[in-house]
Amino acid sequence: MTGRFAEGERVGVLTTEPLGRVLDYRAPEGGCGPGDYVVVPLGPRHVMGVVWGPGEGGFDAAKLRGVERVLDAAPMREEMRLFLARAADYTLTPLPAMLRLATRAPGLGDPPTVRRVYRASGHEPARLTGPRQRVLDALEAYGGAPVTLAELSAEAGVTGSVVKGLVKAGAILEEEAPRDLPYPPLDPGAAAVRLEGDQVAAAEALVAAVAADSYSTTLLKGVTGSGKTEVYLEAVAECLRRGRQALVLLPEIALTSEFLARVEARFGARPAEWHSGVTATERRRLWRMVSEGGAQFVAGARSALFLPFRDLGLIVVDEEHDTSYKQEEGALYNARDMAVLRASICGCPAVLASATPSLESWVNAAQGRYGRLDLGARFGAAELPEMHALDMRPEKLPANRWISEPLARSVEARIARGEQSLLFLNRRGYAPVTICRACGHQIGCDHCDARMVEHRFQKRLVCHQCGATKPMPEACPSCGVEGRMAPVGPGVERLAEEVGTRFPQARVAVLSSDLFGSARALKEQIAAIAEGGAEIIIGTQIVAKGHNFPLLTLVGVIDADLGLQGSDLRAAERTFQLVRQVAGRAGRAAGKRGVALVQTYQPEHPVIRAILGGDEEAFWRAEAEERRVAGMPPYGRLAGIILSSPDVGQVFEIGAELARADAPLRRIGAQVFGPAPAPIARVRGRHRVRLLVKAQKGAPLQAALAEWIGQVKLPANLRLAVDIDPQSFL
């Protein structure tokens, strides 16, 4: 790699501005080096960028503007720049957009300074008002961590004067602290867990992979409760012993609290956190400490993959099958695949952990590209739950009820024994459709071609596409008749209403992402449930993801057929994964075997039979063969092209032009389908058209796509997004 650039030498700088290319500048006084974070002039503005290498030249050097200053931050390493470039090439994302993902921390160029922070003193103020109580509650919610005045005021919804008043009253301590401190060291030998059976061999294999200091990818497959976390934490321990950094990706913020507690019990300190619920101050600190080696272990959401690790020695993707690893807006990437890419560039192992792996990972393991380790039994004395189908066809339920009598009796038995039941329905809100019984009108979003969902707890109608809300109308917006608006179908809120009527004495908790104002509130509710704070839990797919409820012995799946509707390529796979995962929440405590009851109108459906039969390998083999015959992923390749514009005629015209100009795709044997209106054809006032490109597995798809799209000049108000390996077709 090129060494430092002397003052005045031509350098190439990549900024986060949407220009699509590296720009030439003159090196500043004192010079600069590859990877340095710099501030450069761009038109009338001053923007941040990274020195990407030598300038390209081709025009008068005298006309170049100079780099204004080099920021006080560890330079971006060569492996990180290579990772961003290769990720951009694979996803056909402009490189500046990838750089934005890698610089998502405030004040990166600020010099080390002190800041005023606040924490609770433990003393009650003499006068306790409502706003003061909210401040103290907010401090408690931060778990004792020091917070800034702005963060504390925003969290509590008060002005700074309320906080200052509590300082004067002695209830809060105001201190000066360095902005960016290293994280507490973790001790790999602090409290090793005694492993059993398959766990021992699996842990030894992962430890050996870390010790090899070379790239590998391993699928760690184990039934829910089999101790996958304990096994891969042994690999983390080896990584820490070798002085390298470890990254564990989690699919949901709600999972981090329990995971952090387990890590603290194992290593004597908590890892660093990175997700949307972390304060701006902590994000800046973590970003800098990761680059300087002051953070050994990071647990985070998918964007943690773009942190500037100094010496990354292990990447774990927990619940690797989870669809939330796919970024669906902006830069479209799958964090599972990008984790494997980053591990290969860093020369470190990647571990993909799941009870129900994605078909892609299953096939990669079957074909020998990935290693595979299996954990066949639950950890300790816990047993796998029994699984039974409840055939709903003979049930004579009233129109406004969804809990069958056999399921209700099972819930009552759990309540009598002091155990918990989980009722699972993968639908947020109260009802998916609101219809006028006078004229048949269904209330839709004003900005999208989507029906609005009633959220009765919030007394609003909500569009799950764009987030628009409006009050529930008394009169029909179409015919004007009052009192005839009616909900159709159940959501978790409506199910909670039925539970309240059917089990009036039971303590009920509803877990749905839209019911919590913050990630912290959701984590607190989950912790309360785990401690026995509810007898009946009602939840969407958020409950399927790794939570441990020791008292939970019954899972009732209200509508197992819901995910099988439609023509989604992955419908069978996702239904199988989701129902098996949620069923696995039952009976995780020793001595309490769980039961999963699956309500279905299609008990003979192959997916339902596979869920109940437990022969997962047979299901994956059958699903893989169907995909292979059809030439679909993972045996073929897909790319989605999404065009959107306020002008419906324009978007179809460009779509048709693309379809006609498909010669670059035909040269590699690819086919183009469409253009066709997207299933949700209008979102946020923009009309949407999709094209789908299908190619053989080894075809050079990205180069052909780039040439194909480059033939068409796009109007200013038309957006084109390329989705390589699409997960959603909406």
Image: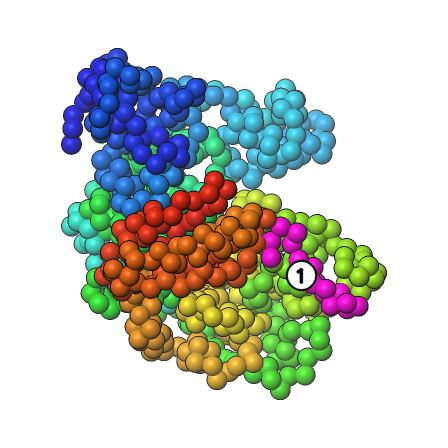
What residue is shown at x 37% (from left), y 53% (from top)?
A: 334
Magenta span dominant secondary structure:
loop
Label 1: which residue? 430
Q: Position of residue 297 (x, y in %)?
A: 33, 42
| Number of other residues with Cα within 10 Å of mark 1, as a class: few under 14, some 14 to 19, many 20 or more | many
Residue toward you, 604 or 702:
702
Q: Position of residue 614 (x, y in %)?
A: 39, 77
Q: Is residue 407 above or below residue 421?
A: below
Residue toward you, 37 or 239:
37
What residue is shown at x 51% (from left), y 54% (from top)?
A: 688
Q: Position of residue 287 (x, y in %)?
A: 37, 33
What amino acid is labelled 1 in the image? Tyr
Q: Is residue 329 visible?
A: yes
What residue is shown at x 46% (from left), y 46% (from top)?
A: 719
- Relative placement, left or right, of 425 versus 180 is right
Q: Is residue 232 magenta?
A: no
Q: Is residue 35 above or below residue 229?
A: above
- Relative placement, left or right, of 647 versus 618 is right
Which segment is the magenta one?
A: 434-449
Q: Is residue 448 magenta?
A: yes
Q: Is residue 464 above or below residue 40?
A: below
